[in-house]
Amino acid sequence: MNAHFRDGSLWTCNTVDGGGRAVARWYEINIGNWPSSGIPSLVQSGDVDLGSGNHTFFPAIYTDSNNNAALVIGKSRSNEFASVMATGRLNSDLPGTMGMPEQLAIGDTAASGRWGDYFDIALDPADHSVFWMVGQYETVFGWQTTIHSFSVQTMVAADSVTVVRGLQFVGNLSDTTQSDDAYLQFHPELTDDPAVPPVCLEFTGTTQFESPGTFRFTIETGVNTVGLVQEVALFNYDTGNFEVVSLQAAAMPDTIVTADATGDVSRFLQAGTGEIKTRLTWQPDGPVLQYPWSISIDQVSWTVTQ
């Protein structure tokens, strides 16, 4: 779909058939001295494959001066309108890997006609750590163009979950690694103390950054009734306590909730190991319409930037 040349490498991408699904694929090719001499060779490639039922397409790729790469793609599934997503990789990441894509915009009606050639990405001429991307999606008002700037981030998936309170009845940790409608689900555990949340989970991950610039926790989740509140707390390794960063009414299923850390965010990373930890709780805020109510979790991740 597009091509970009830097430091002897050609970066490009296209859409391939992933077993009946559209899958965005990217490549880094070492040109060497070709065409004067030598033969180009593949350095690495990877797919942005979001799992069964998901289509990714119209990729556009670019790199910065440190050979960190960013990619913008379209995404859809049979029960989801076409959206615009972005992902990226640090030069130090494992070859062929990209971070978990982040949704930038989503349509509210079916998309049709020619539109994929309006996805593109470039580097900010004044700040070579910032990428600018454009993508299209369709609404009832017609085609829309979304424009975003971002820096390459590390998207960290959870590598463990501790159930402090709650009754697990569907799914496991692997269902939280991507947005694919495969859920980790819980019912509340009975408690005598109204101040004690009947569902309390602790997710743990690991990041390579020692001195992050920004730190965001994201969860795609929902409940099946009203009258519940959801709290997000990040573990402060300086104080040894959880620090509440978000408290809000629990949303209906497949809602993306983000919680941003402020100040010196390095307090949320364990020195030497890069461990990060988030505590999630759900509890009633007055009467609820359904009991036992349930929590559905589709994706859990942390976004960390230098």
Image (cartoon, helix red, strand yellow):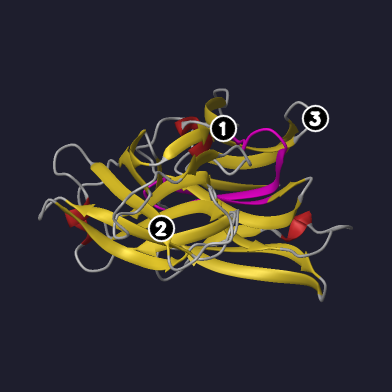
The amino acid type of the residue labelled 1 equals Gly
Q: From the image, state whether disc 1 or disc 3 is nearer to you.
A: 3
Where does the image place residue 230, in percent across and percent down from the top left?
42, 60
- The image shows residue 19 at horizontal and vertical percentages of 76, 26
Q: Tell me if mark 3 has few (under 14), some (14-19) or many (20+) residues whose alpha carbon lies within 10 angstroms of its own.
A: few
> Is 130 rendered above or below residue 22?
below
The residue at which mark 3 appears reads as 20
> Looking at the figure, which quarter contains the C terminus?
bottom left
Amino acid residing under circle 2? Gln
- Part of the protein shown in magenta: 46-74
Looking at the image, is 167 positioned above or below residue 120? above
Name which of mark 2 and mark 1 comes first in the sequence. 1
Name the residue that disc number 1 marks.
46
Disc 2 secondary structure class: strand
Mark 3 → mark 2, Cα distance in angstroms: 42 Å
For this view, does 195 lie left or right of residue 284?
A: left
Query: Which residue is label 2 attached to?
Result: 283
Q: From the viewer's perspective, is 4 left or right of 93? A: right
Residue 165: give x, y in percent of width and height: 34, 42
Q: Secondary structure at mark 3?
A: loop
